[in-house]
Amino acid sequence: MQEVQRFNKVLKSLVLFGDLILLNLLLWGFNLFLGTRFWCIHCGSIFQGMTLITLCYLLCNMHSGVILHRPVVRPEQIMIRVLRNMVPFVFFSVCTLLVFHFHFSHSRYFGLFYVALIIVIISYRLISRHFLELYRKKGGNVRKVVLVGSHENMQELYHAMTDDPTSGYRVLGYFEDFPSDRYPQDVPYLGQPNEVSVFLEKHAGEVDQLYCSLPSVRSAEIVPIINYCENHLVRFFSVPNVRNYLKRRMHFELLGNVPVLSIRCEPLESLENRIIKRAFDVVCSGLFLITVFPFVYIFFGIAIKLSSPGPVFFKQKRSGEDGREFWCYKFRSMKVNAQCDTLQATENDPRKTRIGEIMRKTSVDELPQFINVLKGDMSIVGPRPHMLKHTEEYSNLINKFMVRHFVKPGITGWAQVTGFRGETKELWQMEGRVQRDIWYIEHWTFLLDLYIMYKTVYNAIHGEKEAY
C-alpha cells in the first residue's frame, strides 16, 4: 500500500510539474509571437511575470488540483476540477500582477492566454490519465483488496473494482460464513470472517485494503480485524449495508464522533457558498434596480396602465425556502381576474393583455422579482417558486417534490433553461422540472449559476415557444 501511495504522490507532483512547464511555455510563446501587444515593456520583465504567475498557480492547485490518479475518475470530473481551480487562479494571478504594477498592453490577449491555458491543461490531464490507465491495465499501480461479507452492496463494490481494468484494484478473494453465489465462481473463497487476521498475517505485505460489510451486531469479529489492519498498514473500510433500500450515492459526515450517512450533498449548505451566492445576488439585484429597472418600470408601467385597469405590479403568495410563504412580484401581464391564484397561464389565455403577451414572451414580467432577490426571499438562480395551491397539489403527487424548497427559489433555474419552462399540462412535465431542480441543488456551483443566467438571456433574445 505504501508503494501505491508513494506512486500517487510522485504522479501528482509530476502532473503539477508538467502543468507549470506548459504554463510557462505558453506564456513565453504568447510573449514571443505577440511581443509588446501581450507583455507591456514598461512593467517588469516576462521572467518576473512568469515567477509570479507560477507561484499563484501552485497556491491554487497544490492542495486539490490533481485527481487523475484516483482509482475511478471520469473525464468530465478531471475537466471540472481544472475549471474549478482555474477560477481562483485567474482572479488571484491578475490581482497579484496588478499589485506588483504589471500592466497589460491588451487585456483581450491576456484573456486569450487564460483560455488557451485551460484548453492545454485539460488536454494534458486527459492524456496523462489515458497513459495511467494503460499502465494499470498492465498490472502497475494496483491495490490488492480483500472483501469481508457478501451483501448486495459488496457485490456491487466488487464489480465497481473489477469491471474496469483501469481502476487499479485487484480482488484477492472474500471471507464469508459460507461460499457465496453473489460473487463469480473464479473469485477465491478465503474462509470465515474469524480467519481474516490469520490470512493477513500469513500474507503480510500482500494486502493493501480490506472492505468489510459485516453487520454491527458482529462487532466481536469486526474489532479484531480493524485492530490487525491498523497495526499492520492495511487500510480498513467499513461498507454499510444500506444499498438494499437506498439505491443512490450517499455522503459520509460526522456529528461529534458519530458517523452519519446523508443521502444528499448540497453545496449551498456550506456557509462560504451561501455567502458567495448571496453577495452576488445583492450586488447584481442592487445594480439592476438602481440602473436599468427604473426605465423598464416607467415604460412598461405606462403600457400596463394603458392596456387595462389595475396595478402595475402583480403580487402573489408563493412557496419559498423551507416552505416559507412570501409575496412574489411580477409586472401584471393579465387583466385583473379571480383565478390568478389557482389557474396557470395557457398558450391562448384570454386573460392576457397585448403588452402582457410581449412581456411574457421576453420574460420582462419577471424583472420585479429582483426586488424579491434584494429582500432575500429569492435568488437570481434557483428552482422557480410555485403558487401555494400547486405546491399543495404536487407535493402529494410527485415524490421528492418538496426537496426543491431546500434552497431559495430563483428568477430563473436549471429546469427553465433545459426545456421545462412554462405551463405544466401533464404530470411528467412537472416531474421533469422537479428532477432538474434537485440536480441543481446537488450540483450547484457559482459557474453553473453564471451559465444558467447566460442561457436565460440567450433564450429570451431568441425566443421560447413555451414562454406564454
Image (cartoon, rainbow, N blue to C red):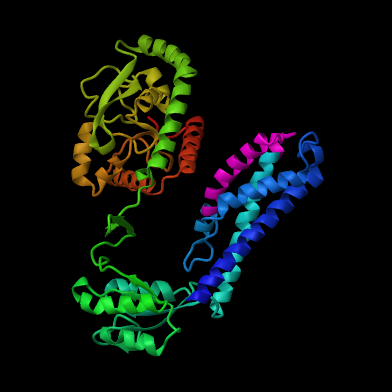
- Give the quarter of the image for residue 313: top left
- Give the quarter of the image for residue 303: top left
Q: Quadrant of the C terminus?
A: top left
What segment is highlighted magenta in the picture? 81-109
> Which residue of the protein is positioned furthest toward the front in this rendering?
231
**Residue 320 showing in the rendered view:** yes
Q: Main secondary structure of the magenta part?
A: helix
> Is residue 411 in the magenta section?
no
> Is residue 107 in the magenta section?
yes
What percent of the width, then of the height, locates residue 374? 38, 25
For the point 34% across and 31% down, the residue is 378
What percent of the width, then of the height, locates residue 230? 37, 75
Task: Report the side of 429 relative to 278 (left or right).
Answer: left
What percent of the width, then of the height, locates residue 147? 34, 79
| Rendered position, 33 above or below 130 | above
For the point 49% across and 32% down, the residue is 457
> Which residue of the protein is positioned furthest toward the bottom in this rendering?
202
